[in-house]
Amino acid sequence: MPLALFGAVGYGARIAALFMPMQAIASLVLAVVAEQASDRAVLAVVESLALIAFGCPCALRRPRS
Protein backbone atom coordinates (compact mmCIF):
# COMPACT_ATOMS: atom_id res chain seq x y z
CA MET A 1 0.00 0.00 0.00
CA PRO A 2 2.78 2.56 0.72
CA LEU A 3 4.31 1.76 -2.67
CA ALA A 4 1.02 2.56 -4.40
CA LEU A 5 0.58 5.77 -2.40
CA PHE A 6 4.10 7.19 -2.43
CA GLY A 7 5.89 5.52 -5.35
CA ALA A 8 9.23 3.75 -5.39
CA VAL A 9 11.35 6.73 -4.26
CA GLY A 10 11.95 6.43 -0.54
CA TYR A 11 9.88 3.25 -0.23
CA GLY A 12 12.34 1.48 2.08
CA ALA A 13 12.59 4.44 4.43
CA ARG A 14 8.81 4.75 4.67
CA ILE A 15 8.35 1.05 5.39
CA ALA A 16 11.06 1.17 8.06
CA ALA A 17 9.49 4.23 9.67
CA LEU A 18 6.13 2.47 9.81
CA PHE A 19 6.96 -1.03 10.92
CA MET A 20 10.28 -1.11 12.78
CA PRO A 21 9.01 0.75 15.86
CA MET A 22 5.97 -1.54 15.98
CA GLN A 23 8.14 -4.65 15.89
CA ALA A 24 10.37 -3.36 18.68
CA ILE A 25 7.43 -2.39 20.88
CA ALA A 26 5.63 -5.67 20.25
CA SER A 27 8.63 -7.75 21.31
CA LEU A 28 9.12 -5.79 24.51
CA VAL A 29 5.43 -5.76 25.46
CA LEU A 30 4.96 -9.46 24.77
CA ALA A 31 8.00 -10.39 26.83
CA VAL A 32 6.71 -8.40 29.81
CA VAL A 33 3.14 -9.70 29.50
CA ALA A 34 4.27 -13.30 29.06
CA GLU A 35 6.37 -13.03 32.20
CA GLN A 36 3.76 -11.27 34.35
CA ALA A 37 0.32 -12.44 33.13
CA SER A 38 -1.64 -15.31 31.64
CA ASP A 39 -1.84 -16.75 28.14
CA ARG A 40 -5.15 -14.96 27.59
CA ALA A 41 -3.48 -11.64 28.33
CA VAL A 42 -0.74 -12.37 25.79
CA LEU A 43 -3.35 -13.18 23.14
CA ALA A 44 -5.25 -9.97 23.95
CA VAL A 45 -2.06 -7.94 23.55
CA VAL A 46 -1.24 -9.66 20.25
CA GLU A 47 -4.74 -8.92 19.00
CA SER A 48 -4.46 -5.26 20.02
CA LEU A 49 -1.08 -4.85 18.36
CA ALA A 50 -2.38 -6.50 15.19
CA LEU A 51 -5.22 -3.99 15.02
CA ILE A 52 -2.78 -1.13 15.54
CA ALA A 53 -0.47 -2.52 12.84
CA PHE A 54 -3.44 -2.72 10.47
CA GLY A 55 -4.41 0.86 11.26
CA CYS A 56 -0.96 2.35 10.61
CA PRO A 57 -0.99 1.92 6.81
CA CYS A 58 -4.64 2.93 6.74
CA ALA A 59 -3.71 6.24 8.35
CA LEU A 60 -1.19 7.14 5.63
CA ARG A 61 -1.79 10.24 3.58
CA ARG A 62 -0.37 11.11 0.20
CA PRO A 63 2.33 13.78 0.61
CA ARG A 64 1.47 17.25 -0.65
CA SER A 65 3.51 18.35 -3.63
Image (cartoon, grey):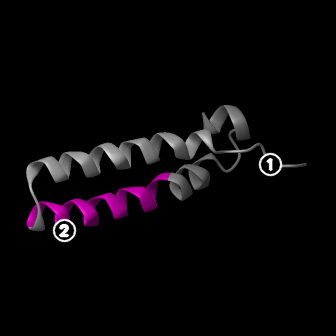
* In this picture, residue 62 sits left or right of residue 45: right
Is residue 44 shown above or below 36?
above
Callout 2: SS = helix
Q: Main secondary structure of the magenta part?
A: helix
> In the image as oriented, which residue stretches furthest toward the right?
65
Which residue: 90% across, 49% down?
Answer: 65
Q: Position of residue 39 (x, y in %)?
A: 10, 50
Q: Give the residue at mark 2.
A: 32
Pinpoint residue 42: horizontal percent, then vertical percent.
18, 52
The tag earlier along the polypeptide, 1 or 2, is: 2
The vertical placement of 32 against 44, above or below, is below
Q: Nearer the viewer, residue 11 or 56?
A: 56
Circle 1 crowding by C-alpha within 10 Å: few under 14, some 14–19, many from 20: few
- Per the image, the residue denoted by label 1 is 63
Say whether residue 22 is magenta: yes
Residue at the image point whose x is 57% and y is 42% from the top: 57
Q: Amino acid at mark 1?
A: Pro
Q: Residues within 10 Å of mark 2 (few under 14, many from 20)?
A: few
Instruction: State how far apart marks 1 and 2 are (Cα).
Output: 37 Å
Q: Nearer the viewer, residue 17 or 29?
A: 29
Q: Position of residue 31 (x, y in %)?
A: 18, 64
Magenta extent: 19-35
Q: Are marks 1 and 2 in contact (CB under 8 Å)?
A: no
Residue 12 lies in the magenta-colored region = no
Identified at 27% across, 60% down, the residue is 27
Rendered image: mark on residue 46? none
Q: Quadrant of the N terminus?
A: top right
Disc 1 element: loop
The amino acid pointed to by label 2 is Val
